[in-house]
Amino acid sequence: MKTRAALVGFGAMGKAVAELLKNHMDLCLCGIVDPMSPSCLPSLDALNEQPDVIIDFSHPDSLPMLAQYIRAHGTPAVLCTTGYSEQQEALVHELSQHAPILRSRNMSLGVCVMERVLRMITPVLNGYDVEIIERHHNKKIDAPSGTALALARAVESCGSFTEVHGRDGIVGARKKGEIGIHAVRGGTIVGEHEVLFAGEDEVLSIRHSAQSKRLFAAGAIRAALFAASAGRPGLYTMDDALFGGKEA
């Protein structure tokens, strides 16, 4: 029997997920929720059957609806929406007490591996200057990207760092322990992230480039299968889905 997935949000990413679910071996789509689309259901409560997992590619404004449903039913959820406030992130943590919640700002398997690589090499390259550059299409509404922030967190988990978001004017010499984060917006760039480690006489660049939105949809589906089978409430990550374990 296939795992039933409810999709929240029917923008470009929601459509990509729905397309991949059409012929998926293990997941089936039991409903699409998007209050902004007349062709979709207005809320999760309008579903004809209870899903085994929720995949959310919507908007931060949808979080209260998701929270109400998850508290009531304990339904596992994969939250892919970016742009949450600190209060909304706190709500996500609270929801993880009721159900398995997989929270990721980027569903790419390659980005997940990139984060793990950063945690491995940052202690080795102690003292190197770290800069993060992210590039996205001209319609992206938040900056820096959630993925850039996640990459910064991976580096920061290995030491004491201070984030500097862009530089302008006479800022003086670069301070020890800074992580420069820079956002580029233009055209139809799907998503590019680069982390530079600049040392004496050498620069190491670790870069990921997304070629289409399908890769994020594929990652979300893999995450949904993990969340549906997690078995107990908790806050999970893509690292958990790919490598096992549970983030505390």
Image: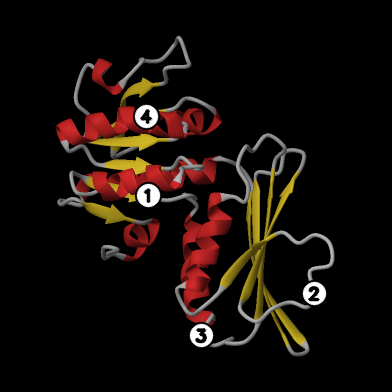
Work out which residue is located at the far right of the displayed protein and give it.
170
Q: Secondary structure at mark 4?
A: strand
Q: Which residue is mark 1?
A: 103
Look at discs 4 and 3 and give the one toward the viewer.
3
**Which amino acid lies under the numbered mark 2 shown in the image of this protein?**
Gly
Among the 4 quarters of the image, the one containing residue 192: bottom right
Location of the C terminus by quadrant is bottom left
> Which residue sits at x=33%, y=30%?
64
Callout 3 amino acid: Pro
Amino acid identity at mark 4: Leu
Secondary element at image label 2: loop
* Numbered circle sitting on residue 7: 4
Q: Mark 4 or 1 closer to N-term?
A: 4
Question: In the shown orientation, is residue 71 left or right of residue 129?
Answer: left
User: How much space separates mark 2 and mark 4, taking CA atoms?
Assistant: 48 Å
- Residue identifier under label 3: 123
- Residue ID for mark 2: 172
The answer to whether residue 111 is above or below residue 25 is: below
